[in-house]
Image (tube, grey):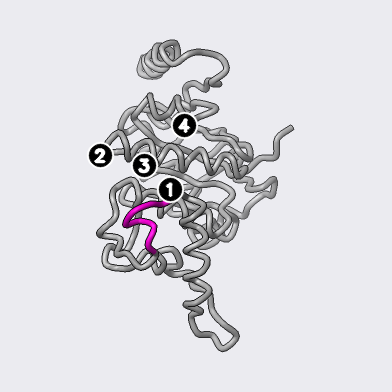
């Protein structure tokens, strides 16, 4: 049995009278990529905000690395300590800061006197960019983030998650508005996460991207998980038809 990076059991979330998430049961294995699919308003964003610690759980359980987490104390800081990193569509990067400074933004390496250890940060940044196979402007740790392409920015944000040893990386629409070449870079970064035995939860509307990198496909509709498919079960065309059927059943 594969170790679980994350397991949610009977999770519910309300916003006033609105039952935003209904009895969500979801598990993600180490080294597994799950594509979370569904139309706008299906509940995907609310679910990833709960996992990331931004929103509070109203009921249910969350297990991280097979350990039950106190959901009353669960927040963004604790989620990061437990190995969960979220990369949003914008990348959440400091546009006017250098590449290496962005990697350690808010979580600096400090020496024994409490000062930021710039030498060590620059060294680790350089090593990470080599692993990510950054080239051109993006390969220079002193480059300003505003000079990077969209794919490089997403790669930098994903690299930051790797640097802090994330066990689960949540990617929110990472390929939106990117060229085909830039999309390919981002998908390669996701494949690196998988090769390093990190779990990944990918939120995307692009079926081609999802089928390329994901092992399983979880479909949400109106706050519930209405279907789940394994990549080994069907080809992309069959999956597309199954998704449409699943959402149609949920709306019925």
* First reached walking from the N terminus: tag 1 or tag 3: 1
The residue where tag 1 is placed is: 49
Estimate the spatial distance between the alpha carbons at disc 4 and disc 2, rounded to whole Å: 18 Å
Q: Are marks 4 and 3 in contact (CB under 8 Å)?
A: no
Mark 3 neighbour class, 10 Å CA radius: few under 14, some 14 to 19, many 20 or more: many
* First reached walking from the N terminus: tag 4 or tag 1: 4
The residue where tag 4 is placed is: 35
* First reached walking from the N terminus: tag 1 or tag 2: 1
Q: Which of labels 1 and 3 is toward the front? A: 3
Depicted 65 relative to depicted 252: above or below: below
The residue where tag 3 is placed is: 174
Q: Nearer the viewer, residue 137 or 252?
A: 137
Q: Nearer the viewer, residue 84 or 144?
A: 144
Residue 196 visible? The answer is: yes
Q: Nearer the viewer, residue 203 or 119?
A: 119
The residue where tag 2 is placed is: 177
First to last magenta residue range: 134-140
Classify mark 2: helix, strand or loop: loop
Q: Are marks 1 and 2 in contact (CB under 8 Å)?
A: no
Depicted 171 relative to depicted 227: above or below: below
Q: Which of labels 4 and 3 is toward the front? A: 3
Estimate the spatial distance between the alpha carbons at disc 1 and disc 3, rounded to whole Å: 16 Å
Q: Residue furthest right?
A: 1
């Amino acid at each position: 049995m594969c170790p679980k990076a994350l397991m949610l059991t009977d999770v519910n979330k309300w916003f006033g009278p609105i039952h935003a998430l209904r009895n969500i049961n979801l598990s993600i294995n180490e080294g597994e990529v799950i594509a979370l699919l569904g139309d706008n308003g299906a509940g995907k964003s609310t679910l990833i905000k709960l996992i990331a610690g931004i929103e509070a759980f109203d009921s249910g359980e969350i297990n991280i690395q097979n350990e039950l987490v106190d959901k009353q104390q669960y927040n963004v800081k604790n989620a990061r300590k437990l190995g969960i990193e979220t990369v949003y569509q914008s990348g959440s990067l400091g546009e006017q800061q250098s590449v290496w400074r962005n990697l350690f933004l808010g979580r600096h390496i400090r020496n024994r006197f409490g000062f930021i250890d710039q030498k060590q940060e620059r060294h680790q940044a350089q090593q990470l960019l080599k692993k990510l196979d950054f080239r051109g402007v993006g390969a220079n740790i002193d480059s300003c983030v505003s000079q990077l392409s969209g794919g490089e920015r997403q790669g930098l944000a994903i690299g930051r998650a790797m640097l802090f040893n994330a066990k689960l990386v949540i990617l929110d629409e990472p390929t939106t508005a990117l060229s085909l070449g830039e999309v390919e870079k981002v998908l390669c970064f996701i494949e690196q996460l998988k090769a390093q035995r990190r779990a990944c939860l990918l939120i995307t509307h692009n079926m081609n991207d999802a089928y390329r990198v994901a092992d399983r496909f979880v479909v949400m509709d109106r706050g519930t998980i209405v279907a789940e498919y394994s990549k080994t079960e069907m080809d992309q065309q069959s999956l597309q038809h199954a998704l449409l059927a699943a959402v149609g059943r949920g709306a019925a």
